[in-house]
């Protein structure tokens, strides 16, 4: 059974492999990270860990029993009881309910472990999978239309005060 793990230094090789193997798949629905992300991956990984140590972000990986990364689930821009949720799943791990289950679990962690009360998320209008996960986990559209790189999208919100 896959396990949600808080990002650690030793996750770097598996996380890089996850990003490389799924780059084209991700680019079809979310903005591409660009070549610099891969060129400077070690420095970026260290920077994410530093942000996590400072409490401004909480990064998580969904890892299978062999240590392979199946997904990323991040809470970023933590401030005043709120954070932005972002997630991405490996192509081979989709359509099994893992994203929905993991977002639900992360919402519980956000409330119980990190003391958050409200989560925000964004998804491109053409990213049906992410929008479905957000809706299934209780997020509601705010009505705010946004742009995610060159794609129109929507903002979502979830009140997690008292648990999800």
Image: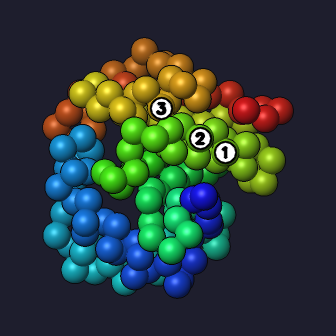
Q: Is residue 77 left or right of residue 164?
A: left
Where residue 77 sits in the image (x, y, percent)? Answer: 54, 51
Q: Is residue 159 left or right of residue 30?
A: right
Distance from label 2 to label 1 (Cα)?
6 Å
Q: Tell me the residue at 25%/69% (across/down).
A: 20
Q: Can you tell which of label 2 and label 1 is closer to the viewer?
A: 2
Evaluate if marks 3 and 1 touch, with contact meaning CB atoms under 8 Å apart: no
- Find residue 105 and name its label: 1
Q: Residues within 10 Å of mark 1 (few under 14, many from 20)?
A: some
Q: Which of the two residues, 33 or 5, is positioned nearer the viewer here? A: 5
Q: Residues within 10 Å of mark 3 (few under 14, many from 20)?
A: some
Q: Which mark is residue 1?
A: none
In the image, 25 versus 112, the foreground residue is 25
- Left or right? Give the position of 138 relative to 72: right
Q: How far is the residue under mark 3 from the one under mark 2?
A: 9 Å
Q: Residue at x 45, y 56 (%)?
A: 71
Where residue 143 appears, x then y in whole percent?
43, 15
> Tag 3, which secondary structure?
helix
Question: Residue drawn 20% across and 72% down?
Answer: 36
Q: Are marks 2 and 1 in contact (CB under 8 Å)?
A: yes
Q: Kindly indicate the quadrant of the structure image that contains residue 159.
A: top right
Q: Which mark is residue 133?
A: 3
Q: How many marks?
A: 3
Element class at badge 2:
helix
Mark with earlier residue (3, 2): 2
Outermost residue to the top: 143
Q: Which residue is mark 2?
A: 101
Task: Judge by depth and name the residue closer to the eye, 17 or 56.
Answer: 17
């Amino acid at each position: 059974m896959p396990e949600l793990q808080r990002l650690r230094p030793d996750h770097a090789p598996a996380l890089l492999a996850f990003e490389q193997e799924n780059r084209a798949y991700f680019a079809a629905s979310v903005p591409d990270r660009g070549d610099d992300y891969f060129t400077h991956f070690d420095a970026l990984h260290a920077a994410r860990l530093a942000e996590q140590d400072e409490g401004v972000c909480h990064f998580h990986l969904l890892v299978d029993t062999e240590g392979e990364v199946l997904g990323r689930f991040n809470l970023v821009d933590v401030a005043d009881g709120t954070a932005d949720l972002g997630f991405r799943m490996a192509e081979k791990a989709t359509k099994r309910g893992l994203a929905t289950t993991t977002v639900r679990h992360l919402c519980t962690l956000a409330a119980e472990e990190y003391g958050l009360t409200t989560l925000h998320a964004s998804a491109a209008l053409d990213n049906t999978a992410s929008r479905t996960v957000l809706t299934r986990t209780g997020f509601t559209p705010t009505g705010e239309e946004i742009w995610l790189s060159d794609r129109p999208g929507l903002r979502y919100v979830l009140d997690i005060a008292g648990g999800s």
